[in-house]
């Protein structure tokens, strides 16, 4: 038995996105959507914004990023991705994000 036990509680949406199906619920696509929502929240908390999903420019940029990343023409869900080299948990994004608007599908690095 362990001499000491520690418990860490965290908001589920920030720490867990199950991947157990190829498509549909709990798939890689839903996990990616969760990451993009989380990172978009970080950008907004740092004073930036994400272009609305219906913005034609943002939609075109997202399609280009999605095609390049996945090798297919699948649509990118709304949101942005923050490189883990820039921020691990949303810290230090103010200098990069404040006052900026990012197109959907943008990888901020």
Image (spheres, helix red, strand yellow):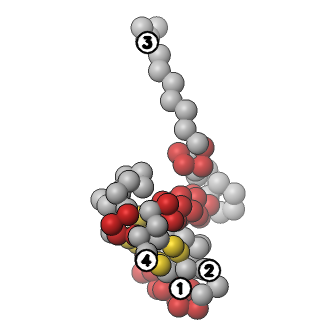
Task: Residue 48: give x, y in percent of width and height.
Answer: 47, 71
SS for tag 4?
loop
Residue 91 x, y percent position in the rendering: 38, 53
Answer with mark 4 or mark 3, whichever residue precedes in sequence: 3
In the image, 104 versus 73, the foreground residue is 104
* Element carrying mark 3: loop
Q: Which residue corresponds to mark 3?
A: 4
Marking on residue 58: 1
The residue where tag 2 is placed is 53
Query: Callout 3 environment at 10 Å: few (<14), some (14 to 19), or many (20+)?
Result: few
Residue at horizontal 60 percent and vertical 87 percent from the top: 55
- Disc 4 versus disc 3: distance between alpha carbons? 46 Å
Q: Which residue is mark 4?
A: 100
In this view, the residue in front, 30 or 86, is: 86
Spot occupied by residue 27 in the image (x, y as percentages of width and height) = 61, 58
- Which of the two labelled residues, at mark 2 and mark 1, occupies the earlier sequence position? 2
**Residue drawn at the location 37% of the way across and 62% of the way down:** 93
């Amino acid at each position: 038995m362990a001499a000491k036990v520690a418990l860490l509680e965290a908001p589920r949406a920030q720490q867990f996105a199950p991947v157990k199906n190829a498509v549909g619920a709990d798939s890689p696509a839903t996990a990616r959507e969760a990451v993009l929502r989380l990172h978009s929240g970080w950008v907004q908390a740092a004073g930036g914004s994400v272009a609305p999903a219906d913005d034609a420019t943002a939609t075109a940029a997202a399609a280009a990023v999605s095609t390049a990343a996945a090798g297919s023409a699948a649509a990118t869900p709304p949101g942005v991705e923050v490189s883990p080299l820039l921020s691990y948990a949303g810290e230090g994004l103010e200098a990069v994000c404040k006052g900026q608007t990012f197109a959907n599908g943008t990888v901020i690095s």
